[in-house]
Image (tube, grey):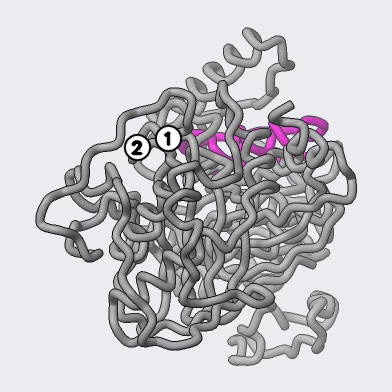
Amino acid sequence: MANTGSNMCSENPDVYCEIEATVPTGFEPATKQEIQDKLGVSSVVERGHALFKIPVKDALKCLELQSVDNLYVVVKHFEHIEYPDDKDGSLQVIGELVPKMDYTVPLNVWKQFIHFDHEVSPLPCKNWLDQHAAETPCGNIKGGELELSDSENVVAKKPKCSEIDNMDGPSVKNDSTVNTNSIESSVSTQDAPPAKQPWIDSLPAFRATCYRTGSNHAFQSQQAAHHFGGILQDYFGWNVSMKQFDIEVVLNITGPKAYVTVGLTKQSRHKRHISHFGPTTLRPTICFSMLYICQIQPGDVVCDPMCGGGSLPIEAAINWPQSVHICGDIHDKAYNRAKMNIDCLNNKYEIKGKPKIDIQVFQWNTCSLPLQDNYVDVFVTDLPFGRRSGSKADNRKLYPDVLRELARVSKRSTGRACILTQDKRTIQRALDGMQKLWKRRSTFWVNIGGLAAGVYLIQRTKNVYSAGKDNRKGEDDSNKLEEDNSGGENDNKTNSTKDEEKVTENTIN
C-alpha cells in the first residue's frame, strides 16, 4: 500500500505537473510550436528553456519532443526571496526552501522516466523529523514567496551528516552550474568532519546542481549547491553520488526569483542516432529544429547537399518518413561517415524490429548537383563556418555558388531552404546578390558550440533561374519579387537598403 498515493496521482486526469524543457538557444520558437503540435498545450518560452503544464498521466509524452535537450519536472517556484546581506544568512534561507516544498507529484513523474527498484518516499526521513519536531523556521513562505521575519534570527544550520564534504572538489558545468561536491568553505563547519553516512541500497542516490544568474547575491553557485544538497540529504536521507545518481535536484536562481526542479533525463537527448562523429557534427536537437521550421510535408523531396556525418538527413528520415530524403558531400571521409551512421542506425532498428530509414547518399559537388531543375522541395544544410572547416575567404565564392545551384534545383515559388552558418557577413552578401531567386522569410540567431550563428529560412521565388545573368532584384518589371510576408513592396534598387536587410527574427511563418 506504500505506493497507493502515487498511483492515484498518476491515474488522476486532474493532477497536473509543470515540465521544463531546455532548448538550444535561439530555437525556442520551434520548440514552442512543437509542444503545441505534439502535446496540445501552450508553453512559456524564455531564453534556453520552455515551461508548460501537462497531466501527470501524460508526462511520458514529453519524450516525443525532439527539439529539447533535457527535461525536468518543476517542484516549486519562489517569486521573491529576500536574501540577507551575509553569506551564511543567505545560505540559511536557501536551506529553508527544502522542507517548504511538496515532492509528491515531482517524484511520481520522476518514477515514470527513471527506473529504480524501490519506492521513493516524498516525506522526510525519521532523523529529520526527530531533529526538527520542535523547531520553528526563521522564515515562512506565503504563496510561493519566502519572507524573513527578522534577519537577525538567521542562523547557519550545519548538516547532520553529509557525504558531500568528502568529495574531491567542485564539478562545474559552466560559469553558473555546480554540483553538491563543492568546496568545504561554502558552509560553516566544525573542526572535525562529520561522519560519513553509510550507503543504503533501498534509497536512491542524488546530486544537487545550481544554476544562478544575477550579481546581487552574497553567495556563489558552488556554495548554494553545496548547502542546498546538504540539507536535501538530511531531509530525505538519500545517498550521494556525483556521477552514478538516480535523482538530480536543480536549484535555479535568477535575481530574487528561484525555482527547483527534478531531472527526468540522465543525459542530454541530443546524444542520439549518431555513432561516428566528425569535426563539425551537428547536434540532432538543432537538426530537428532546423527541419521543423521548414514545415516539411508528406511527399516532399528533402536534401542536405553538404551532409557531413549525416545528422540532418538522419533526423529528417526518422521524423518525416513519408518524405524523400537525399544527401551528399564532396569529401570521401564525410561520405563514408554518413553511410556508416545510417547503416549503424538501421542495424539497431533491425534488432529492435523497427522499420529502417531510407536515405540516398551521394558523393557530389554542391556547386554542380546531379539533380534536375525544379526538383527539390526543401534544402536543409550546415554551411562551412570558415573556422574548423574551410575559410572565410573561400566562403566568399562558395556561398554565392551554392545559393545559385540550390536555386536551380529548388521548386519555384514553393521551394525553401534552411541554412545554418556563423559567417553572417558572407551569407548576407550572397543573399543580397540573389534577391531575384531567394527571399528571406525569417532568421534565428542561435548558439552553436559557443559561436553566435544564424539560421536563415529562405524561399524560392517564382523567377526562372538563368545561368550567367544578374540575379539581383530589379532587372526589369516582369522579374520583380513578390511582396514579403512581413509587408512592404520591394523597390528596384540593386543594393538593398538597411530596411530591406531587416528580417523577422525568431518567428515561425
Residue tagged by mark 1? Answer: 205
Query: Could you say which is closer to the camera, residue 505 or residue 124?
Result: 124
Few, some or many residues within 10 Å of mark 2 (<14, 14–19, 20+): many
Marks 1 and 2: CB-CB under 8 Å?
yes
Q: Earlier in the sequence, mark 1 or mark 2?
A: 1
Q: Position of residue 68 (x, y in %)?
A: 61, 50
Name the residue at 77% across, 81% down: 476
Residue 298 versus residue 98 in the image, above or below = above
Q: Is residue 265 at least partly visible in the picture?
A: yes
Secondary element type, mark 1: strand
Q: Which segment did they paint magenta?
A: 301-330
The percent coordinates of residue 89 (x first, y second) are 34, 77
**Which residue type carries mark 2?**
Ser
Q: Quadrant of residue 467?
A: bottom right
Residue at the far front: name it: 134
Say which residue appears at 21% left-offset and 46% top-offset.
Answer: 194
Label 2 sits on residue: 241
Instruction: Tell whether 193 sits left or right of 408.
Output: left
